[in-house]
Amino acid sequence: MKNYTITVNGNVYDVVVEEGASSGAVAAAPKAAPKAAPKAAPAAAPKAASAGAGSVKVEAGAAGKVFKIEASVGQAVKKGDPVVIIEAMKMEIPVVAPQDGTVASIDCAVGDPCEAGACLATLN
């Protein structure tokens, strides 16, 4: 199950979505007072490949969905090389290496949702 906070016309709703539910049932509970900003979604557990995670984080610049993974673990990348491409509002946005290094882990999969600032990969 995943928990989301959704704001519609100033009303804040906590929504719980069950994965694999065939009925499509969604439980929503309205909150009494609107929030100034929605709370961040809980961070996803890192993938198994992140066991040797590097010290340099490759973070998403915008919220969206992982569209494509351009680099693989062990691959050498230069500053500015695309590591992951995210899709937001029908646009493909490259998430690039902040410096030269070697990809230590890829912490996302194609189709995963991501928030702005989420760590998608690490470099050594």
Image (cartoon, helix red, strand yellow):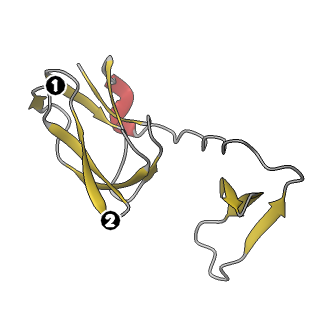
Q: Vertical placement of 102 versus 37: above or below?
A: above
Mark 1 surroundings within 10 Å by alpha-carbon count, few (fewer than 14), some (14 through 19), many (20 or more): many
Image position, residue 49 (x, y; %): 33, 36
Residue occupying the point 69% across, 57% down: 7
Question: Which quadrant holds the C terminus?
Answer: top left
- Mark 2 and 1 residues: CB-CB less than 8 Å, in contact? no
What percent of the width, then of the height, locates residue 16?
71, 60
Judged from the image, the secondary structure of the residue bearing numbered disc 1 is strand
> Is residue 111 rendered to the left or right of residue 6?
left
Q: Position of residue 39 (x, y in %)?
A: 66, 41
Above-or-below relation of 103 to 85? above
- Give percent across and percent down for residue 50: 36, 31
Q: What's the distance in space between the residues labelled 2 and 1, CA to CA?
A: 30 Å
* Label 2 residue SS: loop
10 Å neighbourhood of mark 2: few (<14), some, or many (≥20)? few
Question: In terms of depth relative to the viewer, which is nearer, 112 or 40?
Answer: 40
**Which quadrant of the rendered structure holds the N terminus?**
bottom right
Residue 4's label in the rendered image is none
Amino acid type for the residue under numbered disc 1 = Thr
Q: Is residue 18 left or right of residue 82?
A: right
Q: Mark 2 against mark 1, which lies toward the viewer?
A: 2
The residue identified by callout 1 is 102
Q: Judge left or right: residue 74 versus residue 95.
A: left
Residue 59: quarter of image: top left
N-terminal-most mark, 2 or 1: 2
Residue 90, numbered label? 2
**Residue 69 sits above or below residue 80 on the image:** below
Q: Closest to the observer: 85 or 11?
A: 11
Give the residue at the far bottom of this rendering.
23
Which residue: 13% across, 26% down?
79
Q: Is residue 8 above or below residue 40?
A: below
